[in-house]
Image: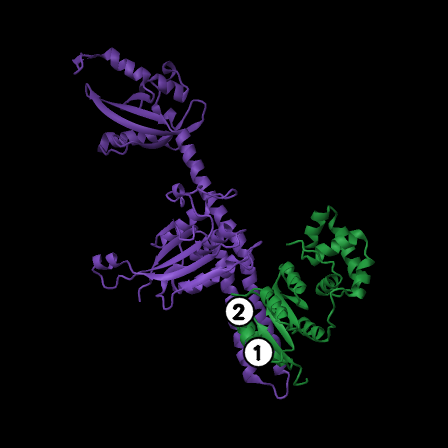
Chain colours: A green, B purple
């Protein structure tokens, strides 16, 4: 275990979550620093050389989405991993649209968390009109595109079936094909591709 | 035998007979053995027997079991002991029609003696409709109580699912961390022990959250404990933000420092605060200038303290939840907390009624008024817990 895997900043209003995540990340060799809210992070966190910001969506005062936007507005490009509650994908997607790199649903285990943090660190910053993403998305059929847009808007398969008037099985089939064609490994990856291709439409929750 | 009444109307037996014939209540007379002596037309309509066929029969045919079998004993006991159980008292009883149909009736019994014979007069009113209406009303009330609780539960369960995630994240993290540092050589046992303790704490916390959720659907007595009202309010603000379109709403907090604790059922007070905050958020939705503000303060009603002799008589804590929305029509302020009163198009008018019930049960007051911003301020008070 390398002693200098990097510095992770944790922003969560729950003390136990902060302490737990710090203990976990430290056991993986990361250095950590934790803040209870967005304002404190802005005041104290930016001075440090943060490798990754692990940010909860829901915070008192300025919330996670606002912090993402504020950081980007200030020109800070610290990689951000959003933590969202189960079923709160649409908010996580919105965070990615504002410039977060990835999201993870609470509760999560350590390996997926570490994988994402490492993934973010090596992630190439995708530009607004990423030709590769565009090319991947363009291979989708109109129906697959519809399904993808619903998926990255955070809708459950059941809801998508209802919205598009097709069966659940069909949705699952389209969804699997979308993942295959785009080469997306996770939902967050798909969201990133869709955003890069400018194809994640805002449909709300 | 005839008497002269004040206004010159002759009261004779014909008139009395007419009164009996036209009385809306059934009038039945019986002898001391229970044998029916007379059966008024209203009684005929009520019970379905013609007077001719029932005269001489035991009055217990008009009663369902078990009273039917016991009525002779009731009468015998009265004749022996003189103890009045129904005479001159009246009560609601079950009666039975000729068809066998049973119904609720109000029975009043009078007694007279003639030639050494006891004669009892029963006045019977069919209260089927009233009882049915009452039954329906109370069933409806019970249903509404449940609906409002379930509705609140639906909203709360989303929030609580989020809350449960927090201890779960902490538990997973501490557990994985502990496993990893125990695997080091040498293992960092002190640190791991501390983390294991935190895991147990967080599991307890998750359990407490679940208990709270379950209590929402349970009825019955509140669980009154001294609580820090500010922490209850803060928790509720977080809960209130959850829901479509309610994220990112600014809530201005002005919580007084050093408030004394209040004696409350935390879950119930949460229901009140969440309800009021959600109402306030709804009131300012779609309005760029509207804001929701929540304040707590110590309310020392000076006059109260002067009047009460007890030095321990504590003050009250007041919570104010206000909005810069369109405000409340003057005429609704009086009835706002009554069930089924609502200003919302899709509202049921239950939320504020539940709030009032809860605050009443805590010995506090709840009221609404217009505020300087043109919106509405909702206030409620809670008595402080004694030291």
Closer to us: B171 or B119: B171
- Indicate which disc residue A13 carries: 2
Please report whichever mark, 2 or 1, sits nearer to the chain's N-terminal start: 2
Instruction: Output the chain of dot 1.
Output: A
In the drawing, does residue B86 fall left or right of residue A121?
left
Q: Nearer the viewer, residue B205 or A89?
A: A89
SS class, disc 2: loop
Residue A46: x %, y % from top left: 59, 77
How busy is the neighbourhood of tag 1: few (under 14 within 10 Å), some, or many (20 plus)?
Answer: some
Q: Is residue A136 above or below residue B279?
A: below
| Disc number placed over residue B17 in the picture, else none | none
Mark 1 — residue? Answer: A33
Q: Distance between the residues labelled 2 and 1?
A: 14 Å
Establish if B383 lies above or below A21.
Answer: above
| Figure check: B257 above or below A171 | below
State the residue lying farthest toward the bottom.
B186
Front position in the image: B206 or A15: A15
**Residue B227 x %, y %:** 39, 64
- Judged from the image, the secondary structure of the residue bearing numbered disc 1 is strand
Q: Residue at x 43, y 54 (%)?
A: B322
Q: In which quarter of the image is residue B165?
A: bottom right
Q: Do labels 2 and 1 share a chain?
A: yes
Q: Name the quadrant containing residue B294.
A: bottom left
Question: Is any atom of residue A37 visible in this view?
Answer: no
Can see residue B293?
yes
């Amino acid at each position: 275990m390398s002693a200098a895997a990097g510095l992770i900043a944790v922003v969560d209003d729950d003390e136990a979550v902060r302490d737990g995540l710090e203990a976990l990340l430290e056991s993986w060799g990361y250095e950590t620093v934790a803040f209870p809210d967005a304002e404190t992070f802005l005041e104290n966190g930016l001075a440090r050389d943060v490798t990754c910001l692990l940010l909860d969506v829901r915070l008192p005062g300025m919330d996670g989405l606002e912090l993402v936007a504020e950081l980007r507005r200030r020109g800070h490009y610290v990689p951000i991993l959003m933590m969202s509650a189960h079923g709160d994908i649409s908010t996580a997607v919105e965070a990615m649209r504002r410039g977060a790199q990835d999201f993870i649903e609470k509760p999560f285990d350590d390996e997926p968390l570490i994988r994402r943090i490492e993934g973010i660190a090596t992630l190439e910053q995708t530009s607004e009109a990423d030709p590769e993403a565009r090319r991947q998305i363009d291979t989708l059929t109109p129906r697959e595109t519809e399904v993808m847009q619903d998926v990255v808007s955070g809708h459950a398969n059941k809801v998508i079936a209802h919205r598009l008037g097709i069966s659940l099985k069909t949705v699952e089939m389209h969804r699997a094909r979308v993942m295959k064609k785009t080469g997306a490994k996770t939902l967050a990856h798909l969201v990133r591709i869709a955003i890069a291709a400018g194809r994640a439409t805002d449909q709300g929750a | 035998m005839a008497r002269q009444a004040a206004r010159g109307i002759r009261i004779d037996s014909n008139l009395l007979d007419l009164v009996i014939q036209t009385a809306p209540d059934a009038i039945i007379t019986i002898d001391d053995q229970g044998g029916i002596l007379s059966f008024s037309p209203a009684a005929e309509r009520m019970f379905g027997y013609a007077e001719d066929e029932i005269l001489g029969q035991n009055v217990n045919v008009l009663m369902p079991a078990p009273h039917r079998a016991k009525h002779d004993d009731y009468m015998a006991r009265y004749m022996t002991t003189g103890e009045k159980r129904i005479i001159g008292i009246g009560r609601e009883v079950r009666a039975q029609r000729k068809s066998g149909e049973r119904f609720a009736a109000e029975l009043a019994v009078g007694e007279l003696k003639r030639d050494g014979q006891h004669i009892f007069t029963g006045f019977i009113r069919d209260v089927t409709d009233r009882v049915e209406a009452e039954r329906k009303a109370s069933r409806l009330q019970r249903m509404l109580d449940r609906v409002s609780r379930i509705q609140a539960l639906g909203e709360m369960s989303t929030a609580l699912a989020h809350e449960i995630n927090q201890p779960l994240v902490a538990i997973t993290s501490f557990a994985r961390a502990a496993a990893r540092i125990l695997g080091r050589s040498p293992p960092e046992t002190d640190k791991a022990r501390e983390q294991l303790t935190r895991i147990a704490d967080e599991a307890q916390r998750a359990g407490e959250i679940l208990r709270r959720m379950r209590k929402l659907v349970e009825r019955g007595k509140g669980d009154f404990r001294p609580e820090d009202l500010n922490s209850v309010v803060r928790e509720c603000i977080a809960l209130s933000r959850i829901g479509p379109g309610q994220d990112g709403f600014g809530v201005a907090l002005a919580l007084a420092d050093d408030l004394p604790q209040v004696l409350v059922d935390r879950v119930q007070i949460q229901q009140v605060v969440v309800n009021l905050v959600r109402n306030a958020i709804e009131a300012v939705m779609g309005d760029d200038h509207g804001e929701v503000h929540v304040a707590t303060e110590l309310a020392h009603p000076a006059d109260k303290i002067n009047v009460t002799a007890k030095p321990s008589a504590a003050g009250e804590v007041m919570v104010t939840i206000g909005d810069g929305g369109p405000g409340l029509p003057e005429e609704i302020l009086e009835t706002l907390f009554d069930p089924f009163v609502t200003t919302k198009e899709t509202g049921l008018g239950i939320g504020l009624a539940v709030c009032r019930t809860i605050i009443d049960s805590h010995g506090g007051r709840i009221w609404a008024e217009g505020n300087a911003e043109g919106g509405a301020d909702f206030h409620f008070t809670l008595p402080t817990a004694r030291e």
